[in-house]
Amino acid sequence: MPEPILQVRDLTVHFYTYAGIVKAIENVSFDVYKGETFALVGETGCGKSVTSRALTQLIESPGRIVNGEVIYHSEKGPIDLLKLSEEEIREIRGNEIAYIFQDPHASLDPLYTVGYQIAEAIEVHGKVKNIKEGIKKAVDILRAVLIPDPEKRVHNYPHELSGGMKQRIVIGTGIANNPRILIADEPTTALDVTVQAQILDLINSLKEKYHATVILITHNLGVVAETADRVAVMYAGKIVEIGSVEQIFKNPLHPYTKGLLKAVPNPMTKIERLEAIPGTVPNLITPPGGCRFHPRCPYVMEVCKKKVPELVEIEDGHFVACHLY
Amino acid sequence: MAELKKFLIRRILTFVPTIIGVTLIVFLIAYVIPADPAKAWAGGEKASPEAVERIKERYHLNDPWYAQYIFLVKGIATNTLIDPRTSNPVLDDIRDRFPVTFQLAIIAFIFTLIIGIPLGLISALKRNSIVDTIVRIFALIGVSTPVFWLGYLLIFVFFVKFRITNLAGVPPTPATQITHVPIIDALLTGEFTLFKQHLARFWLPGFVLGFMGTGVLARFVRNSFLEAISGDYIEFLKAKGVPKLKIYRHALKNALVPIVTVLGLQFGGLLGGTPITETVFALPGMGSYAIQSIQNLDFPVIVAITFIYALIYVTANLVVDILYAVIDPRVRY
């Protein structure tokens, strides 16, 4: 039995806007095991990023974590991250649980050198005495993320670097404190295709090197097949299916997962022609009752409109939330 | 460094057309006013025709307008232009009055900064709360309060009722002059009683002059800070585990470019406000000198003061441009 490092239970986040309450994610539950790469997939707006940020209370007003538990198995024992005070969670953020954001052009403060920004990440967790010492460490980190000429690059400003280089800096910032969990929120979306593979390789090799657990958020199924061990598929703020990569790609159970896999070239099976899922993503202020996917589902039944399906285990480690099973 | 030098030379060259333009416009306005300055300078209606003629001769008033303008500019450049009212070279008169105005502007600017920036920050941090609304109302009051009204009101409170300030004369300048601004020199040379005297005389007019800018500055600080704090890098800083205060420092630095811009413009605006403030508080500075000159049709002085004001304004803007590059590494000369 693999050992869980993170157990998410019934996580619910609402955004209170003028238009109404946006139920961004509802009752999201999943486990992440030590040392694995766990992928969270789904289309834009399905709540992947909100889920990942809610894990360490990184939800800004007008958003609020309404309900749920995030049990983190730290070296000192399990703690509920959502019950920690602002200062306690700050000590964990960037230290034990670190993030890599989507857009490297926007993630770095344009007015500070990249060395300073990495050094700052180390300094705020008290691992170096001052920024100057941190910059010395930053040189080693730049070397670890394969930036050429690191002694010189630490003194560069973000605008002096390319997108791929900037994302390496962001990754470097993420791993600066040897985190136990690295949450990569669409780390390759804003980059050129040629650079994407390099960045994924880098994340993978760093994961091996530091024995970290990676939570990878992406809408790119190719990336998932390439890097992930287990996958959770999200739709309209809910998890519809969880399983290993083989289970999800070879034996997708949920109609949404099936639709997704038909819409992209499947790396595991041969398909003749790509199909789109009919309909659009629902409005999360007034989500459809019952199963949120029912208006677009080809197998819709009466029960789907009334009852919210629960996640049930169909085969070992393969869960699905669908009335068909 | 070489780039900075080039930039400075280029910018200082652009001063020339700006200043010529400003002084020319002021001169032309004065020129087309249907009045007879020579007669006014000679002593009004009773002046003898010979005296009026001599003055016209001396100030080239019979020449076409461009010749008159060139005469004035040459006179200012060589300091040979004599004020027809005081019989001193115009620039000497200005030099005597400049420190008062500059000192007033500096104190007003400090008031604007120490009130405007904290108010803007508080407003941003407590956005859409009661505090924010109060600051917004304060900003509106600030920009719409006339200087002369606020001036007399505060004179009533602080002079008539409580005697916390005085309104006559100007304290002496310190013996050793370093910057030629008395209050700074007094502080630098350690003459603290003199410093206190200057402060007692200048704080109220400085506050009144600076008050108008505080509201505008507070609004600017608020909006730029809010824009900076909504940046993605701020969220990444949070994800890095950076404490709140340090995050605010990042946001403030990013908000600084628009703030510095508005500060540069406000310093120019302060100079524009000095004539009224100096008149209300009976300060013998450049502003009240300008008012007296206007009342006496004293065109040479008006053009000379315009020249000085324009020079200060463009210099303030040059300082702002240099500050951009200091703040933001993306800005190159």
Image (spheres, rainbow, N blue to C red):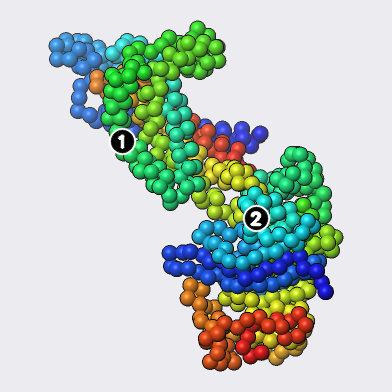
Quadrant in which residue B276 is drawn: top left
Label 2 residue SS: loop
Label 2 amino acid? Leu
Chain where mark 1 sits: B
Evaluate if marks 1 and 2 touch, with contact meaning CB atoms under 8 Å apart.
no
Whether residue A121 is situated above or below residue B70 in the rendered picture: below
Amino acid of disc 1: Thr
Q: Is residue B45 left or right of residue B63?
A: left
Do the residues marked 1 and 2 share a common chain? no
Q: Which residue is mark 2?
A: A84
Mark 1 falls on what kind of element? loop
Quadrant that contains the N terminus of chain B: top right
In the rendered image, residue A258, in percent from the top left (x then y), is placed at 66, 86
Q: Mark on residue B284?
A: none
The residue that label 1 is drawn on is B145
Counting from the top left corner in percent of width and height, residue B53 is at 22, 14
Residue plotted at (36% across, 18% down): B164
Q: Is residue A98 visible?
A: yes
Task: Specify the farthest residue to the left.
Answer: B46
